[in-house]
Image (tube, rainbow, N blue to C red):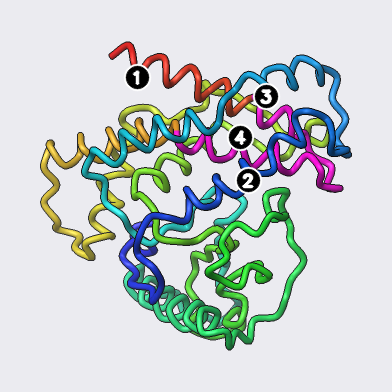
């Protein structure tokens, strides 16, 4: 993540992507919650969920959280925006292949990512279309600035000898965004598990959230990589600032993915979109109450 955040991608560097996505999705929300659009999703508590959706004001909540962000000083970087465990692959060295140092792997990642994503941005991508492999890879198109038909921005270099050991996939949501959002979104994913073979096809366990020490260990290594300096001197103030960003932007992540989930209840993909959306809304409301209390 530190390496991705340090990239300089030739695209708009304003953090408009997340707001544009949410605004576009909100425009189609009413027809879903009032039942005028038929959904393909089964739910045992549909009436209760629909009532919560009818009373939850996304426009108001978006305005509230954006007003706080606009008044703050939150770094904007190039973000993956969906860096969860399903999008992080570890490549095992093949027989006879020399293992590379972390720095060599990072350099390869930067080179591959710059070249491949650059081609996509120029409209000249030679990446082969691949079958989407996770429930989040569905319409509406999340990132209109990019070619979102591609499952991975690194697919075209999979056979390269200098391919990085760590493979990050699913760049369809990538855009310039608030640093705190990408970090917070990653940690939230610690509490979700998408291996449930039964409806709603996910587990949610909020007790699996990262401890304070785990977050700080992550932040320390993240900042060293972001600054490309293993000896980077991280002050206590900087550590606290990044951790505070994570805590605050956890709310925005819940708001974003809850809206995404509701909009996608029309999808033919079997997934508990109502249940997932409700889970994220409830987490958002809990965190907002705690934030306002402090």
Q: Quadrant of the N terminus?
A: bottom left
Counting residues from the start of the chain, the first of labels 2 and 3 encountered is 2
**Residue topped by disc 3:** 53
- CA distance separating discs 1 and 4: 19 Å
Q: Residue drawn at (88%, 38%), measured in percent from left and top?
A: 38
User: Which residue is identified by label 4?
Assistant: 258
The tag on residue 46 is none
Looking at the image, which is closer to me, 293 or 232? 293
- Picture layout, residue 154 above or below residue 122: above
Q: Is residue 124 magenta?
A: no
Circle nearer the N terminus (4, 3): 3
Q: Quadrant of the C terminus?
A: top left
Rounded to the nearest whole Å, what is the CA distance between mark 1 and mark 3?
22 Å
Q: Main secondary structure of the magenta part?
A: helix
Q: What residue is disc 2 on?
A: 25
Mark 1 or 3, nearer chain start: 3
Residue 198 relative to residue 143: left or right: right
Residue 105: image x %, image y %? 40, 73
Q: Residue at x 68, y 22 (%)?
A: 54
Disc 2/disc 4 C-alpha distance (Å): 11 Å
Where in the figure is residue 162, as x and y percent of width and height?
48, 83
Please state which of the two labelled residues, at mark 2 or mark 4, is closer to the viewer: 2
The Cα–Cα distance between marks 2 and 1, rounded to whole angstroms, is 26 Å
Find out whether the residues at labels 4 and 3 contact each other: C-beta distance under 8 Å. Answer: no
What's drawn in magenta, residue-wise? 252-278
Q: Are marks 1 and 3 in contact (CB under 8 Å)?
A: no
């Amino acid at each position: 993540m530190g390496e991705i955040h340090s990239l300089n991608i030739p695209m708009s560097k304003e953090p408009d992507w997340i707001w544009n996505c949410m605004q576009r999705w909100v425009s189609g929300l009413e027809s879903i919650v009032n039942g005028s659009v038929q959904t393909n999703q089964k739910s045992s508590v549909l009436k209760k969920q629909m009532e919560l959706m009818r009373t939850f004001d996304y426009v108001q909540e978006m305005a509230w959280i954006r007003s706080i962000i606009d008044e703050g000083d939150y770094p904007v970087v190039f973000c993956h925006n969906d860096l969860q465990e399903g999008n992080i692959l570890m490549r095992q060295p093949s027989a006879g292949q020399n293992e590379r140092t972390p720095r060599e792997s990072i350099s390869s990642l930067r080179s591959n990512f710059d070249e491949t994503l650059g081609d996509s941005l120029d409209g000249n991508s030679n990446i082969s279309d691949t079958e989407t492999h996770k429930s989040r890879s569905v319409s509406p198109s999340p990132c209109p600035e990019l070619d979102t038909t591609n499952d991975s921005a690194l697919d075209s270099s999979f056979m390269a000898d200098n391919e990085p050991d760590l493979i990050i996939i699913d760049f369809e949501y990538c855009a310039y965004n608030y640093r705190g959002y990408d970090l917070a979104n990653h940690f939230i994913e610690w509490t979700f598990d998408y291996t449930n073979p039964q409806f709603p096809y996910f587990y949610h366990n909020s007790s699996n959230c990262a401890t304070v020490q785990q977050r700080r260990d992550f932040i320390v290594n993240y900042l060293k990589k972001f600054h490309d300096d293993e000896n980077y001197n991280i002050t206590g103030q900087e550590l606290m600032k990044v951790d505070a960003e994570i805590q605050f932007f956890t709310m925005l992540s819940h708001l974003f993915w809850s809206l995404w989930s509701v909009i996608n209840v029309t999808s033919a993909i079997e997934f508990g979109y109502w249940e997932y959306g409700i889970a994220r809304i409830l987490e958002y409301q809990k965190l907002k109450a705690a934030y306002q209390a402090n």
